[in-house]
Amino acid sequence: MSEQYVSNSGPADDWWRSAVVYQVYPRSFSDLNGDGVGDLAGVIDKLGYLELLGVDAIWLSPIMRSPMADHGYDVSDPRDIDPLFGDLSVFDRLVREAHDRDIRVTMDLVPNHTSDQHAWFTAALAAGPGSRERARYIFRDGLGDDGSLPPNNWTSVFGGPAWSRITEPDGTPGQWYMHLFAPQQPDLNWDNLEVLEDLRTTMRFWLDRGVDGFRIDVSHGMAKPEGLPDMEHPSEILKHTDDDPRFNREGVHAIHRAIRAVMDEYPGTFNVGEVWVESNEAFAKYVRPDELHLGFNFRLATVDFDGDQIREAIASSLAATDLVGATPTWTLSNHDVPREVSRYAPAGDTGIGELRARAMALVELALPGTVFIYNGAELGLPNADLPDDALVDPVWENSGHTDRGRDECRVPLPWEGTEPPFGFSSSADTWLPIPAEWASLTVEAQLEDIFSTLSLYRQALELRYNRPEFSGDTVEWYGAPDGCIAFRRPGGLICALNASDVPVPLPPGQVLLVSTPLDAGLLPPNTAAWLV
């Protein structure tokens, strides 16, 4: 079982309740072998940086064996490391060395689907209709006299139909299989008990190696409605609603209870689910005491830089977890969401976008609960402007080049030097090109600048851990000028955000930290402050 650690974020078994978790996108974090793609040895090499930053844990995006059709979310062997990133011995060293620095290690788990190169799917194609092998996936006969039409009208989240037709072993056109994502990602049949047993085996495999938890991909997926009814409304790419038959079915909760039972065998571990639902009541079901420890709430990652919207996102998120006594989570970006500097930039003005991103970092880190930081957010990275021929996200191809996908928020990190690849790799040919204009955003440059975004994050994390004013599980809202918000933690911390166009007075108190300097004692636009 996983070793136990005591940190300043709380008792060993529930350390995650107020932790700061740093998302490492391994392809883009640090490349030590010089092939242009980040690897686990690169993560080990940068553990000192993560310790300096002050995070409690890292979450590794997919590193399991995969053909990389969706950059690791198409898993061909869930109990091995893909050679692109290293091997199990390197992974074990990463866990060991991270733990030596009091940094816990969590990793992605992908239970909704496998790769089409997984041994199970290969066997399903060879075995034929009605076989035990096909029963692990969702195979159906097609509609129409010759079965040439998909079994229903479902579309893929990535664009195009959610069904692909196979050729049977005898060479004839055959059944269709469901894939809610890319065709290379066939959905598993969670009505089949063999699927759950295999996931339990996978979880214990990693937990026994010392992993401290999992981020569960598509946690609102897996369960499918009986009869697979047609969709009433066409869906948008990368979006869905609470009444979408493809997701958020009641049967998913029994699956999460089974997953939680395995986690409970390993005290001090936790799981966090990717839960894209809209209503508070629907979200709360996923974080009941016997289901997920945490659920990603993406409200702050999807609202505009607007005081009313931000306050509503915070209040709604707290209300959702309060329904079942769960711990809230906060994040401003991830590998699927545009970077906050670009998202907050009016008319593409990333200068203002950076000010707003700095301010929102203080808002996020002032809130009770668990905070997730996407690698590069602490550097104030914007989305990269990539040429069409550099795009590799399957969304770009599956959408018929109508949606550029998520590559622009996945570009490798700049570490040092004055020109690409900025110390990310010894190869200039990185898997996505790094913009030359990021020279001022490198870790090296920002560590030497006390006013940099990286320095702001380091100061904020240190204060969050060491000041007693950050205690308490609730927030109390203050009256604030139009376009502004202010709240107080029970321990005494006050956070004020000015999302208006004019400087405003600060609430009473001693200033601990500001995201940008005050203006004659006033809080400038696009700025946040902490006070006690």
Image (tube, rainbow, N blue to C red):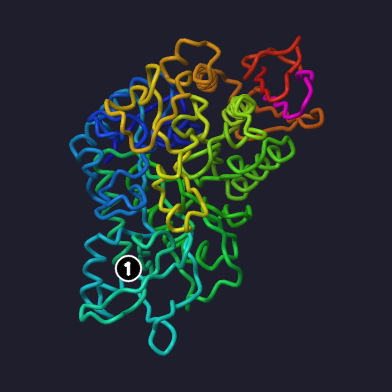
Q: Which range is magenta?
A: 495-507
Report x, y in % for residue 97: 26, 26
Front position in the image: 93 or 324? 93
Q: Within the image, what quadrant is residue 255 found in?
A: bottom left
Inspect this view and state whether residue 150 appears.
yes
Q: Residue at horizontal 28%, vertical 47%?
A: 64
38 magenta-colored? no
Residue with the mark numbered 1: 193
* Above-or-below relation of 78 to 7: below
Q: Residue furthest bottom?
A: 145
* Above-or-below relation of 28 to 504: below
Front position in the image: 520 or 68? 68
Q: Residue at horizontal 39%, vertical 32%?
A: 412
Q: Residues within 10 Å of mark 1 (few under 14, many from 20)?
A: few
Which residue type carries mark 1? Leu
Q: Residue at horizontal 52%, vertical 76%?
A: 229
* Above-or-below relation of 385 to 322: above
Q: Quadrant of the C terminus?
A: top right
Q: Within the image, what quadrant is residue 311 found in?
A: top right
Report x, y in % for residue 280: 63, 52
